[in-house]
Amino acid sequence: MDKHQFLSELKRYEKAFEGILSRFRRDMSGVYIGDGDDPLFRQYVRELVDLFNDMLGTNTYSAQIATEANEGVSNFYGTPSFKSVENITSVLRAALTRFARNQEFLVRSKGSKSVPKRENVFVIHGHDEAKWRELKDLLKNDFGLHPLILSEQSDAGCVTLIEKFERYAQTCSYAVAVFTPDDEVRSDSETYLQARPNVLYELGWFCGRLGRDRAMLLLKERTTLFSDFGGIVQKRFKTNIREKITEIRKDLVDAGIIDGN
């Protein structure tokens, strides 16, 4: 696909999302996605993430779209919110404006794609330092891998945190996210605990970049899991991550990250 076809595809998706927005139903109890549009929305999100990755390599658009989609279904009904569809449409429009002004950016971005290293595993975590340190030691000492903790890396000339994240994340061939109950969320009469926003964003980025089979989710009990993360390999632990070491090993072998011997 050349850059002109890419722009044409983005415009097609823009119109598709505009159509979904126009079909939202409103009544006294709230705003709901139109009949039949929920599966279309999810399909378009996956297609868009793949499209941006195929054309640009490392990019923020895939991560933004995945994050908006995941956060958009974190409601009582588990269906895409009007705001999430609206935000994804805004991401598309921003991309179209940028590429229309400078189409050479497409060529430069594609050419700058990095090759991930097999042994590099990105550790996504929240506030629970004990848990990510336990995971880091397990990956390094038990499996001989190189776990990458963003806060332990140098800035390497990066100006923003997202730039630093992408710089190191693109060198990894696998990601393990530790979901711990860091944030208390109140929604109407319901109160629940969920992982930090950065954890959701980074996991969404890796799902878009590497695919869901290259991302593992370690979920501590009492942490609410968004429905769209249901397709990601997940392990629930009570106290310690090492409780799941046998299952973790098996999935790393299946993904080709470590040898089965």
Image: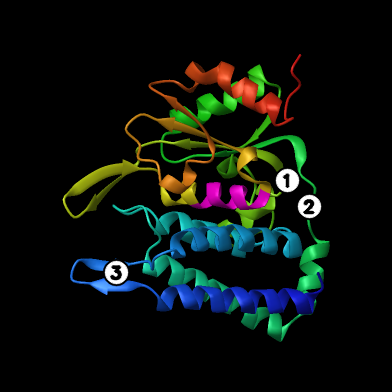
Q: Secondary structure at mark 1?
A: loop
Overall secondary structure of the magenta section: helix
Whichever of labels 3 and 2 marks the residue nearer the N terminus, that label is 3
Q: Which quarter shows the N terminus?
A: bottom right
Residue 160 sits above or below residue 27 on the image: above
| Separation of marks 3 and 2 at Cα, in angstroms | 42 Å
Q: Which mark is residue 31?
A: 3
How far from the left and from the top, in percent, is residue 84? 43, 65
Q: Which mark is residue 114?
A: 2
Camera-side residue: 93 or 38?
38
Magenta segment range?
Answer: 201-209
Camera-side residue: 150 or 33?
33
Relative to 178, 63 lies left or right: right
In magenta segment, residue 206: yes
User: Is residue 85 among what the camera can see?
Assistant: yes
User: Is residue 145 among what the camera can see?
Assistant: no
Relative to 133, 239 lies left or right: left
How far from the left and from the top, in percent, is residue 108? 80, 69
Dots 3, 1 in contact, CB < 8 A: no
How far from the left and from the top, in percent, is residue 54? 74, 60
Q: Residue at x 46, y 28 (%)?
A: 131
Whichever of labels 3 and 1 marks the residue nearer the N terminus, that label is 3
In magenta segment, residue 223: no
How far from the left and from the top, in percent, is residue 70? 46, 54
Q: Amino acid at mark 3?
A: Val
Relative to 158, 34 lies left or right: left
The residue to which callout 1 is attached is: 171
Image quarter of residue 176: top right
Q: Secondary structure at mark 2?
A: loop
Q: Amino acid at mark 1?
A: Thr
Whichever of labels 2 and 1 marks the residue nearer the N terminus, that label is 2
Q: Nearer the viewer, mark 3 or mark 1?
A: 3
